[in-house]
Every structure is written in C-alpha cells, then in structure tokens.
C-alpha cells in the first residue's frame, strides 16, 4: 500500500528534480473532506470522465514537500484503481494489478502520457506506454467514448464487447439485466459492431 502513495506522490510532483530534496519528508496519510477534493477536481478533464466511477465518500490525502496536497479517490467497483489530483492541479490515474507483493503491474496515466511498472519477483521495469495501451490494460472506463458506437479503431468485436460489458455490469442489478435480458446483450453487441 505504501508503494501506491509513494508512486502517486512522485508522479504528481511536476517540479524540477533535486536529489538533495526529499519529495515526502513527513509523508502522512489522512482522510480529507470531499469538498476540498471536489474543489480541485471539478473542472479537470480526467475527473469529468471518471467522476461517476469514484467513491467520493472516503477521500485520502497525502501532504508532501512544500505542503503539496494530494487527494485520492478510489473507484467504487475496484479499490485497486485510484484517481488523484494535487494542489498543483495535476491529475493521475493509478491502476494496480499486483498478484502479490513482488509480481504484477501498476499503470499510471497523466495528461496523455502513461507508464507501466512491471514487477517480476521484486524486480521492476518502468516503460512508457501509449494511452491506448493504458486504457486497454488498466482503464475500461475510457473505452469507446460518449457516442453510441463504442468499437475503437483496430479493436476486435470480442475486445470491445468485454470492455463494454464490464463497464455496463457495474452493479448486481445491471449484471442480472445483462444475463437475463437479451436486448441488453444485443444492444452492447450492436454498439461494438460499428466503427470497425
């Protein structure tokens, strides 16, 4: 868990590097009120897309060097995904896919740039990835856009359908509807049939 906050803190700091200055001299995690979080995030591009997926009832806060405040909201359906915004105005999307403490991956996206941190038996490799790669692996919330047609360029019907059904099936009732109502399954299939 500490690695999440450290990575988020480092990613949110967009200051020049200074090896003598610690980013988190007294890293303390607390809870903050949603009002402070929403005041910073409300007009941000990523927040506008993700706000319906976020649990804003429990906002975590970390204070870093120079009193930079970082507010983090976990996703309602997946506590391993976090949206973060800093008092500097930066936004970060974090998605952890760790199998255990030494193996798995973490994705971080900021302002159209993304990285994947792959862990293999405790050894890490950090690599730049495209937004498309990040979205396919870590963030189905961005899939397809706002229109009816949801199939993205170069995407297979199956990949589109999996992403859309995961997005649709975000509660017990919607999952039951998907399983029992043919019209729901057909609607998702049609949305993934165009823009091929």
Image: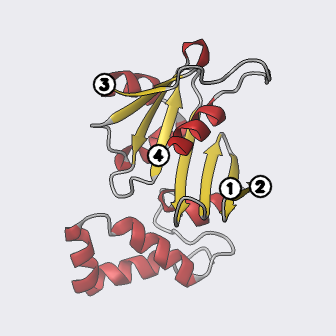
Name the residue that disc number 4 marks.
82
Secondary structure found at label 1: strand
Secondary structure found at label 3: loop
> Reading the chain from its start, which is encountered first: label 2 or label 1?
1
Q: Which mark is residue 160?
A: none
> Reading the chain from its start, which is encountered first: label 3 or label 2?
3
Query: Disc 4 to disc 1, how far (Cα)?
Result: 15 Å
Residue drawn at x 51%, y 31% is: 85
Query: Disc 4 to disc 3, how far (Cα)?
Result: 16 Å
> Reading the chain from its start, which is encountered first: label 2 or label 4?
4
Name the residue that disc number 3 marks.
33
Residue 188 against residue 1 in the figure, above or below: below
Residue drawn at x 69%, y 75% is: 154
Query: Disc 3 to disc 2, how far (Cα)?
Result: 35 Å
> Reading the chain from its start, which is encountered first: label 3 or label 1?
3
* Image location (x, y in percent) of residue 117: 68, 55
Secondary structure found at label 2: strand
Q: Residues within 10 Å of mark 2 (few under 14, many from 20)?
A: few
* Image location (x, y in percent) of residue 87: 53, 20
Check whether the beta carbons of the residues at disc 4 and disc 1 lie within 8 A of each other: no
Q: Residues within 10 Å of mark 1 (few under 14, many from 20)?
A: many
Residue drawn at x 51%, y 41% is: 2
> Reading the chain from its start, which is encountered first: label 4 or label 1?
4
Query: Disc 2 to disc 4, how far (Cα)?
Result: 20 Å
Q: Residues within 10 Å of mark 3 (few under 14, many from 20)?
A: some
> Reading the chain from its start, which is encountered first: label 4 or label 3?
3
Query: Disc 2 to disc 1, how far (Cα)?
Result: 6 Å
Secondary structure found at label 4: strand
Q: Which mark is residue 127?
A: 2
């Amino acid at each position: 868990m500490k690695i999440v906050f450290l990575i988020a803190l480092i990613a949110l700091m967009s200051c020049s590097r200074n090896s003598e200055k610690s980013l988190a001299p007294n890293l303390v995690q607390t809870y903050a009120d949603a009002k402070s979080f929403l005041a910073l995030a409300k007009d941000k591009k990523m927040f506008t897309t993700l706000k319906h997926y976020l649990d804003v009832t429990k906002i975590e806060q970390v204070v870093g060097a120079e009193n930079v405040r970082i507010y983090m909201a976990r996703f309602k359906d997946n506590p391993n995904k976090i949206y973060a915004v800093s008092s500097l105005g930066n936004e970060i999307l974090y998605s952890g896919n760790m199998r255990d403490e030494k193996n798995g991956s973490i994705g971080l996206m900021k302002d159209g740039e993304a990285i994947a941190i792959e862990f293999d038996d405790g050894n890490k490799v950090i690599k730049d990835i495209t937004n498309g790669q990040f979205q396919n692996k870590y963030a189905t919330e961005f899939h397809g856009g706002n229109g009816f047609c949801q199939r993205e360029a170069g995407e297979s019907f199956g990949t589109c359908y999996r992403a859309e059904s995961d997005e649709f099936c975000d509660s017990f009732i919607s999952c039951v509807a998907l399983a029992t109502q043919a019209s729901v399954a057909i609607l998702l299939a049609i949305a993934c049939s165009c823009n091929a």
